[in-house]
Amino acid sequence: MNHYLGIDIGTFESKGVIVDADGRVVASASRSHKMLVPQPGWAEHRPRQDWWGDFTFICKKMLAESGVAPESIRAVATSAIGPCMLPVDEKGEALCNAALYGVDTRSAREIEELDAAIGRERILERCGNALTSQSVGPKILWLRKNRPDIFRKAAKIVTSTTYLVQKLTGECVIDHYSAANFSPLYLLDRQGWSTELSSDIIEIERLPKVMWATDIAGHVTAAAARATGLAKGTPVTVGTIDAAAEAVSVGVVNAGDMMVMYGSTIFTIMLSRKRIEDARLWYAPWLVPNVHASMAGLATSGTLTHWFRDTTARELDRGAAFAALAKEAEASPPGANGLVMLPYFSGERTPIHDADAKGAVFGLNLTHGRGDLYRALLEGIAYGTNHIVDTYREIGTVPKKLLAVGGGTKNRVWLQATSDVSGMAQTVCEKTIGASYGDAFLAALAVGDVARKDIFSWNSEDRRIVPDKKTRATYRKRYRVFRELYDRNRDLMAELP
């Protein structure tokens, strides 16, 4: 029987699956790693340990425990956090830690410089995206200015998926969806690299080759076969960013479909027939030609729940802590007994794009307990998610269908609060494995064994989360407070380190 292997590298955990031709998971494995924060505003991974180390460990473990013959794997697809900025040498080896996606805000000054030199409107028009902490171009410029020795040694500047595919195949490639995050170096009209907007960042020869996500990048080399247990010559797709693979996994196929990914960050992707142009949102060509994607994301979500557990629940068993905290949050009523939390613990991405935004807990009194605080945290993330949905409403492109996925879907308070605040139902599919499952489907798609619509037979609808009308008035009031808390304190936030 044919099999397909998908592995995703996340912010805190990597996951992999082997799937058969009917979409059944026959093997799975995971491995945890840490996000390094060497100083405020920075977020890093160690590529050799956290990316390639996880990939090889998971791959070997699944093959060994499942008994699946490596030769039966028709194709391999991988995804990873992104967009990242990583300089590599001629052999594809990392020259330093990787600067992560929008949660890493080190390039704020470079964004200002590029905006001034090029013009914000011109960048948005040509690239489809305003420059934000999500943009890789300013981070490359930061590297050039602040780590000139490393910059000079770099044969290429790559992102996480590129690094993995190069380790597997020797080919340095990137998909269009990921490349669009390299603003101002990727131009929409060319669907490729250009130094037209800025020649001061990097030469385009030092960037990966741009392809579509379901193209075959190359084949597993002999060295990669020894490291992973895969058969030499196995096709490997170009791959993509984890959120895109996650959207695929739950059937984001039609215009108006929006994925809400409950992961380390909340990340949304909505497909459309035409390009959506708004500086508060991100844009990219989708994984296949002639489909458009509009994205948004919070800076801290699941990351914030980890912080809360490690800070306030150290006495609880680590493995059972989240379940215990969820029960405490359920005991607190909607509205968290008057608490409102701003989840801006690492600045904020969309729609405010403010690296200086700060976290806050508002409304505390002596009656509040840990359950109230945790519920306020979850509701604060729900308010931030609704701020994204409201942005789409303002530009007249309301999502038609919300598809929820990710580890956070196990948290009933978080999931229900998101529907209650937004007033929109959410669909949860049978399999909420996430990006690695989407990777396996993309691997099957790349070798022609499935069509895009076949994801609905691989992963059907399990349940719907319907808004509770009884909470509407409470959440409407709290959401107004949430929005005004930031607006009234934005200037003060910028004064703090």
Image (cartoon, rainbow, N blue to C red):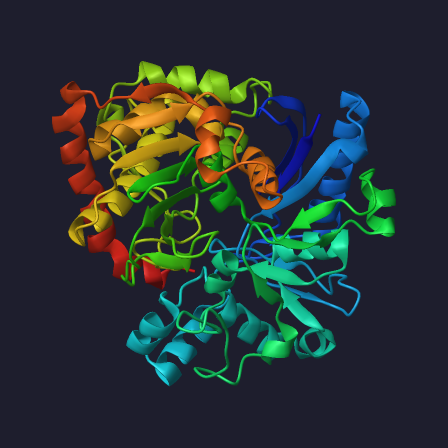
Residue 181 rendering spot, x and y as whole percentages: 47, 62
Q: Is residue 213 above or below residue 250?
A: below
Please tell me which residue is depicted at 56% across the width and 33% down the height of the picture: 437
Please tell me which residue is depicted at 74% across the width and 28% down the height of the picture: 62
Please tell me which residue is depicted at 50% across the width and 22% down the height of the picture: 322
Please tell me which residue lies in front, 323 or 220: 220
Q: Is residue 496 above or below residue 34?
A: below
- Left or right of 259? Residue 274 is left
Q: Quadrant of the N terminus?
A: top right
Can the viewer see residue 359 in this picture?
yes
- Left or right of 269? Residue 146 is right
Q: Is residue 440 above or below residue 270?
A: above
Residue 361 rendering spot, x and y as whole percentages: 32, 39
Q: Quadrant of residue 171?
A: bottom right
- Left or right of 214? Residue 224 is right
Please tell me which residue lies in front, 303 or 497: 303
Q: Quadrant of residue 228?
A: top right
